[in-house]
Each structure stands twice: as structure tokens, then as C-alpha cells.
Image (cartoon, rainbow, N blue to C red):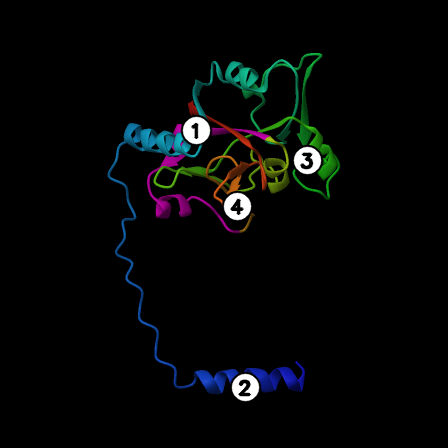
Amino acid sequence: MSSAKEDILARIRTSLADAPVAPEPQRNYRRVSHLNQEQTIEMLVDRLVDYKANVFEATEANIADVIAERLGETSHYVVPVGLNRQWLPEDTPTRTCFTDSGSTLEPGALTVHQLDAVDAVVTSSTVSCAETGTIFLNSNQDEGRRAISLVPDHHICVVPRSTVVELVPEAIDRITYERPVTMISGPSATSDIELIRVEGVHGPRTLDVIILDQ
């Protein structure tokens, strides 16, 4: 460490020497939900719809049909390497699935330009918080790296019912910060000084959420 940096840090420590002790934060907020699963999912759906996301329900038996309908007849889409392939419709001459390796350092990783050229991305999710209408992606194998959920213009996100919780502390308990975390509350949107809403500026302009009954 240089002497100049040592001098600066020493002055900071001296200035803070007589600073008052910060009070202990009061963590008396709710940490456990009292809602049942149906009430929690109803709250999540209400928040997502309010955020202009499209919400659908599916089972293991028909999820591929739901995804096919959202993709349309003509679509080139990307999926993470660990996504359940039984969820996906079969490829057709006009609808093709590309698999991203999960890391820009691995063979098979799509470049930003290639991701920008695809029509959609399909991922799973780690946990969803009904209270805030937020879906958490934790860079797991079935969610992929952050780029694939941010660059394509259309995100189809599968939310298993068992991963839906009501409260933020419950959601935080289910993620790890050893990997990047992406939090999604509706399609990407921003507003200028005149409060004109513009979608798709920082991520997908279309968000389809599929609540999966497993």
C-alpha cells in the first residue's frame, strides 16, 4: 500500500473515531408467510399481470404445447443447457431451438450478436416472490447465464408452483449469491421525464410466465 493511501485511510479512521455507534436494526418484519399456496400464487399472478406480463398455466403434459403457442409457428429461440427438454416443442422447418452452453468461455456459447438475432428465450426459474411480483433467476443450469435472459426480445419463463413464496425473506432464503442473480418484475420498461413508458430498453419487451403444476 502506498504512503499516500495510508495517510488517507488514517485520516478517515481519525475522523470516524468519535462517531456514534449505529443502532442495532430492528428486524421485526414478517419472515414466514401465513398464506396457502393458492393464495400465494393468486397474489403473484395479480402482480405479474399488473406489470404487463402474460401469465399462463400448464402441466407437465401440456407445457410443450403452451410454449409452442407462445413461440409461434416461426421462431428461432435459445434455451440453457440444463432446461428440461420435455418442456419444449419439436423443431420444425420454421421453428428451431438453439442451446447455449452457459458460459462465454465454453464451446457452444452464443455471442451477443447471435442472441440478438434470436426471437425468444425459454428458461426455468429459482423462486418467485408474490409480494413484489418478482421472479428470481440464479444462473442455474436450467436458467442459463444472464445474457440469454436479457438480450432476446421475448422471454418465456417457467415458474414451478412449488417455487412460489409470498415474502421477500422467503425468496432470499432460496437463492445463493455464489452465482449471479437476475430479478424480473415484468417486461423491461422505463419512463422518461414525461412518464412515457417504453418497454424493451434494458431487456425483453415481452415476458410470458408459465405457472407449472408439477
Mark earlier in primary sequence (1, 2):
2
Disc 4 from disc 3: Cα separation:
37 Å
Q: Nearer the viewer, mark 1 or mark 4?
A: 4
* Residue pictured at 25% horizontal, 35% vertical: 35
- Tags 2 and 3 in contact by the CB under 8 Å rule? no
- Tags 4 and 3 in contact by the CB under 8 Å rule? no
Residue pointed to by mark 1: 160
The front one of 42 and 53 is: 53
Residue 116 visible? The answer is: yes
Residue pointed to by mark 3: 101
Where in the figure is residue 131, as x and y percent of width and height? 34, 40
Q: Residues within 10 Å of mark 2 (few under 14, many from 20)?
A: few
The front one of 180 and 20 is: 20
Where in the figure is residue 184, as x and y percent of width and height? 49, 39
* Residue pictured at 29% horizontal, 58% vertical: 27
Residue pointed to by mark 2: 10
Assign the N terminus to one quadrant of the image: bottom right
Disc 1 from disc 2: Cα separation:
53 Å
Look at label 2 and name its amino acid. Answer: Ala
Look at label 3 and name its amino acid. Answer: Ser
Q: What secondary structure is marked by label 4?
A: loop
Q: Nearer the viewer, mark 2 or mark 4?
A: 4
Q: What secondary structure is marked by label 2?
A: helix
